């Protein structure tokens, strides 16, 4: 399979995606096999290498991370900075390329790889993961 094909999404994924539409993605970080996207509505959207996803309050996500307290403290600080639109002092999170009001989310597959694409008015951003390697990465301007 050489090309990305639109993947079927579960009912739960449809539900999560419905909540994302109209929210603004502020920034993200990658830890282990997942990407975590901070939204302006105090929620974090988690995307796993398989394309599975979750949507939880930001404090719950950080508390539940399997990371040391320094990492958690840095992430909480970054979350506060991003909500205040201060991106210069971020230590662990990457700000979105620009104001990113989510208008659509699409899920694609290619072999054991998964691509979850976020779309804004004139921008796209994707997370590509591999269940085989357990690696997920961010890509600006996909599709």
Image (spheres, grey):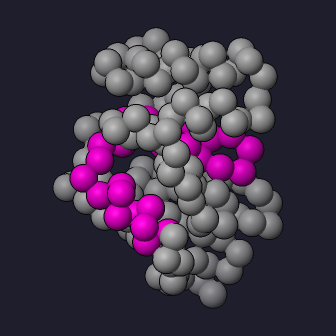
| 73, above or below 117, in the image | above
Where is residue 10? Give x, y as percent: 53, 78
Q: Residue furthest left?
A: 121
Q: Is residue 21 magenta?
A: yes
The residue depicted at 50 percent of the width and 69 percent of the height is: 13
In-front residue for pair 133/21: 21
Residue at 29% x, 37% y is 98
Where residue 26 appears, x then y in whole percent? 37, 35
What residue is at 64 percent from the left and 57 percent from the top? 48
Name the spot of residue 32 as percent of width and height, x first: 74, 44
Q: What residue appears at the point 47 percent right and 82 percent down from the top-left corner?
A: 6
85 or 112: which is nearer to us?
85
| Residue 55 seen in the figure | yes
Q: Nearer the viewer, residue 41 or 90?
A: 41
Quarter that holds the N terminus:
bottom right
Q: Determine the residue located farthest toward the top in the rendered image.
A: 89
Residue 140 % position (x, y): 42, 50
94 shown above or below 103 = above
Outermost residue, bottom direction?
1
For the image, the number of numbered tags is 0
Residue 83, located in which quarter of the rendered image? top left
Q: Is residue 117 visible?
A: no
- Location of the C terminus by quadrant is bottom left
- Which residues fall within the magenta stretch? 13-37
Q: Is residue 123 left or right of residue 16?
A: left
Residue 76 falls in which quadrant of the image? Answer: top right
**Residue in the foreground of this view, choosing between 79 and 140:** 79
């Amino acid at each position: 399979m050489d090309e990305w094909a639109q993947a079927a999404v579960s009912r739960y994924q449809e539900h999560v995606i419905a909540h994302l539409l109209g929210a603004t993605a502020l920034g993200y970080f990658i830890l282990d096999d997942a990407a975590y996207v901070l939204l302006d509505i105090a929620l974090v959207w988690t995307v796993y290498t398989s394309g599975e996803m979750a949507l939880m309050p930001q404090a719950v996500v950080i508390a539940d991370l399997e990371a040391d307290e320094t990492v958690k403290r840095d992430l909480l600080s970054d979350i506060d900075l991003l909500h205040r639109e201060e991106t210069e002092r971020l230590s662990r999170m990457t700000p979105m390329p620009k104001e990113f009001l989510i208008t659509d989310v699409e899920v694609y597959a290619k072999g054991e790889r998964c691509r979850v694409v976020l779309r804004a008015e004139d921008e796209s951003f994707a997370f590509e993961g591999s269940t085989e390697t357990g690696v997920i990465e961010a890509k600006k301007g996909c599709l």
